[in-house]
Amino acid sequence: MGLAPSYGAGAREVEVAYERGVRFFFWGALRLPSFGAGIRRLPRDQIAIAIQTFTHRGFLLGPSVDTARLRLRTDFIDILCLAFREEGIDPHVLDAARALVGRGVVRSLMVSAHDRARLVSYANDFDALMVRYNAAHRGAEEAVFPAARAVVAYTATRWGSLVGPMRASDCYRFVLSHPKVTSCLFAPANRAELDEALIALDRGPMSPDELAEARRIGDAVRAHRKQAPPFRKRDYVTGVVRSIREHGLTEDLISRFNR
């Protein structure tokens, strides 16, 4: 499982997750200082760190990675994700990413996209593909997984809509039970959600009967709620303003406007 700070996880959550067996930390869309502080306290040789960037400007890639390394006090980043590549990847960005691997400051490259066909087209150039996958959205099993060297899955709870019919920990167990999935991201909003998610590590893979039941529930949830939560411009703007107020003008924020 890979811990992400999307809903406010900080240093204490990082430490608890590590104590419970988590070794993958995704300092992703918001590089929250508290989350970074938690990572700095962990044994570097026992964890994997991933960061992501939304920028479509090759010259911004190096500074983004170097800033992350300095803030985390590490010589290298294990995984650099080129995020949300729905319209292709500028060759300059890909060249810059490969140059970072050549320098040894990045160990491997990952890419994410919602469009599965587009994501598969990137497979030969990346060590891992990051894709939406859960009990209700299983199309990636046939459309993406066979082409991927490794898979990092996200939205295991389907924006929370699977929780209720299923336990959150079972949502993660379902995803992690697939042999092609290398890691499943989770982003708890509080300690209770963190503890529930980590139960997945204690219970391990689902049995065939559990998998069948999870698929049945997933189909029912998808039939009842076919669409993702609607994009609300006001919510997006509010989120950007809050991010600037709380964290300053971060690279992640800037890169969203450099597409």
Image (cartoon, rainbow, N blue to C red):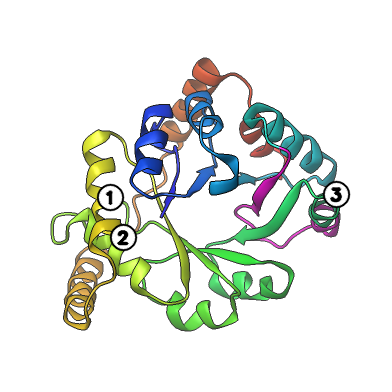
User: Residue 256 lies in what quarter of the image?
Assistant: top right
Q: Looking at the picture, tell me which residue is in the foreground, 125 or 3.
A: 3
Q: Tell me the kind of residue under disc 2.
A: Tyr
Outermost residue, left direction? Answer: 165
Amino acid residing under circle 3: Arg
Quarter in which the C terminus is drawn: top right
Q: Earlier in the sequence, mark 2 or mark 1?
A: 2
Q: Secondary structure at mark 3?
A: helix
Q: Which disc number belongs to residue 103?
A: 3
Other-residue count near label 1 (Cα within 10 Å), few / some / many at <14 / 14–19 / ≥20: many
Quarter of the view holding residue 12: top left
Which class describes the residues within 10 Å of circle 3: few (<14), some (14-19), or many (20+)? Answer: few
Residue 90: say if magenta. yes
Residue picked out by circle 2: 172
The residue pinned by badge 1 equals: 197
Nearest to viewer (mark 3 / mark 2):
3
Q: Is residue 80 above or below residue 132?
A: above
Give the mark nearest the N terminus, 3 or 1.
Answer: 3
Pointer 2 and pointer 1: residues touching (CB < 8 Å)? yes
Q: Quadrant of the N terminus?
A: bottom left
Gap in angstroms between the C-alphas marked 2 and 1:
7 Å
Tell me where residue 166 appears, x and y as whole percent: 16, 61
Q: Describe residue 118's horizontal placement relative to residue 93 as left or right.
A: left
Vertical arrangement, residue 48 with respect to residue 249, above or below: below
Q: Can see residue 216? A: yes
Q: Nearer the viewer, residue 229 or 251?
A: 251
Q: Secondary structure at mark 1?
A: helix
In the image, 227 versus 28, the foreground residue is 28
